[in-house]
Amino acid sequence: MTNFTKSCLLICTVIAAVCSNGCDKTIEQDVLPGYAPAKIDSKGGQWVLYLPDTLTPTVAVPAEVSSTTYQNEITELKGILSSRTADQTDMANYWNTGAVYRWHEIARNLAAKYNLPPVARPDGTYPVPDAANPFAEPKFPFANPPYASRVFAYLGVAQYEALVKCWAVKFQHNRLAPSKNDASISSLKPVSDIPSYPSEDAVVAAASFEVLKAMFPCEVEYLTKMRGEAINSRLWAGTNVRSDLDAGDTLGTAMGKKVMGRAKTDGMGGANKPNADGSLQTIIQAAQALDPTMPPWVSLDLPARQPLLPAFGKVKTWNMTATDLVTVRPAQPPAIGSNAFMTDLEELRKIAKKQDREQMRIASFWGDGPGTYTPPGHWNRSAADLAYRAQFNELRFARVMALEGTAVQDAGISCWETKYYYYYPRPFQMDNDVKSTLGTPNFPSYTSGHSTFSAAGAEILSYLFPNDAASLKSMAIEASESRIYGCIHYRFDCEQGLVAGSKVGDFAINRARNDGSDAE
């Protein structure tokens, strides 16, 4: 196990010990204290956006620090700090860890909560969560790996886009934090020279709220509470006056809505519909035309399920084009019964017969099945931990999460396009003695989703954190091999998934090289 993997495990273990649905924020803060970022990225307002720059939110010109208006705000802030309760101090310290970090943590928790496959009805059919009626059972959404990858991508992009705009306004007006203007104010969080107007924390809270309330509509009450707590925590921490927060809330809301406008037309609404008439026959016939001897994948659930998101491969990508998807698609898998096929099937037979302890550990650690935040969540967590360790400012932190999130969603789109192009059978469909320890995924085998997600995540994070490249690549390989050890995938599923995922990651790297963030 790599040192980076061990450090992630340590942090996760500590947090898991004190967290359930909510966390003891005091204890978690002890693990993850706030910091003042060394780099302020004064030109961050010029960084390249993901979406066309068609929106310029109206943000009022801030009052001068010598004005009566601002001095009244300082007086209000002093009153808030003088009456701050122990609970408010705890909440301030919890959010001091960083807005981008905490909102992705919230997203991962929601992804895990909603990662529950619908249960069969008495008649043997399966209900589908309905976005138009989210509270009906089963509640919307089913946060499977592709869905989760989309959540993290949109959350990362919304935060990044909103913070680019925020940075432009900050350095236009250059109004510093209250404690920089009044020495009698003591902040609970170390203060940098990044201007405080608008508040980056309020921007992130508002933009994140717009994304997550759409992705998890049953959680609006909870998300509203967390948004209010995140914004108020900056008063309790002494890092902002109220106008900083109001301006940030306005800007973040506008940018979050802009980004979610893309979600309405990205094709996700049709991802469960393979073609116009709702039939899978066109997909199956096209796959069998490539290899007439291949038995197509079938669901081994009882009762049988419809395959998961057969048109997710048609969802709009972030860093790639539809043509790019075709170029990334792996070559045709081995013919059933060929030497290559039999070699990999035999490997699975041996593992199924006698799985050693290390194989069992790896399969379990990377399982990321129902009730977890999925493989995309695993890499989202790694990205957040790396950015936190680097002590990035909120804008640069959001850039990491957007690059990683879009790379991983693109990897999922690429993988699902491949899965339903070849419609290849799972190992346990071809040999009943190959028993999986990880359940029966409800979609075709070739290629491995874990491998594709992980290779893309490792590729972009290795570029962003080159000192951790060896550990990250090792993690991706381990995640890939975990699917072999769990008898979920043939080795060629995993090896080709790693190759494809790395190629997808390269598209994100190309974006990163040209987004203007290295200009300073």
Image (cartoon, rainbow, N blue to C red):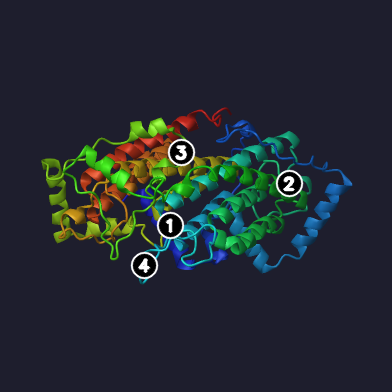
**Residue 234 horizontal/vertical position (percent):** 68, 55
- First reached walking from the N terminus: tag 1 or tag 4: 4
Q: Find numbered disc 1 in the image and state the secondary structure of the residue it sits on.
A: loop
The residues tagged by marks 1 and 3 sit, at their Cα atoms, a distance apart of: 21 Å
Quick one: label 4, few (<14), some, or many (20+) residues within 10 Å?
A: some
Q: Residue at x 51, y 58 (%)?
A: 31
Q: Find numbered disc 2 in the image and state the secondary structure of the residue it sits on.
A: helix
Residue 491 in sight from this viewpoint = yes
1 and 3 marks in contact (CB < 8 Å): no
Quick one: label 2, few (<14), some, or many (20+) residues within 10 Å?
A: many
Q: Nearer the viewer, residue 277 or 234?
A: 277
The residues tagged by marks 2 and 1 sit, at their Cα atoms, a distance apart of: 33 Å
Quick one: label 3, few (<14), some, or many (20+) residues within 10 Å?
A: many
Indicate which disc residue 120 carries: 4
Indicate which disc residue 247 carries: 2
Q: Residue at x 62, y 37 (%)?
A: 164
Quick one: label 1, few (<14), some, or many (20+) residues within 10 Å?
A: many
**Residue 225 horizontal/vertical position (percent):** 64, 62
Position above or below: 81 against 394? below
Q: What residue sits right under mark 1 in the picture? A: 373
Q: Nearer the viewer, residue 151 or 69?
A: 151
2 and 3 marks in contact (CB < 8 Å): no
Amino acid type, label 1: Tyr
- First reached walking from the N terminus: tag 4 or tag 3: 4
**Residue 51 horizontal/vertical position (percent):** 57, 35
Q: Nearer the viewer, residue 149 or 510?
A: 149
In the image, farthest residue toward the bottom = 122
- First reached walking from the N terminus: tag 2 or tag 4: 4
Q: Find numbered disc 3 in the image and state the secondary structure of the residue it sits on.
A: loop
Q: Residue at x 32, y 41 (%)?
A: 418
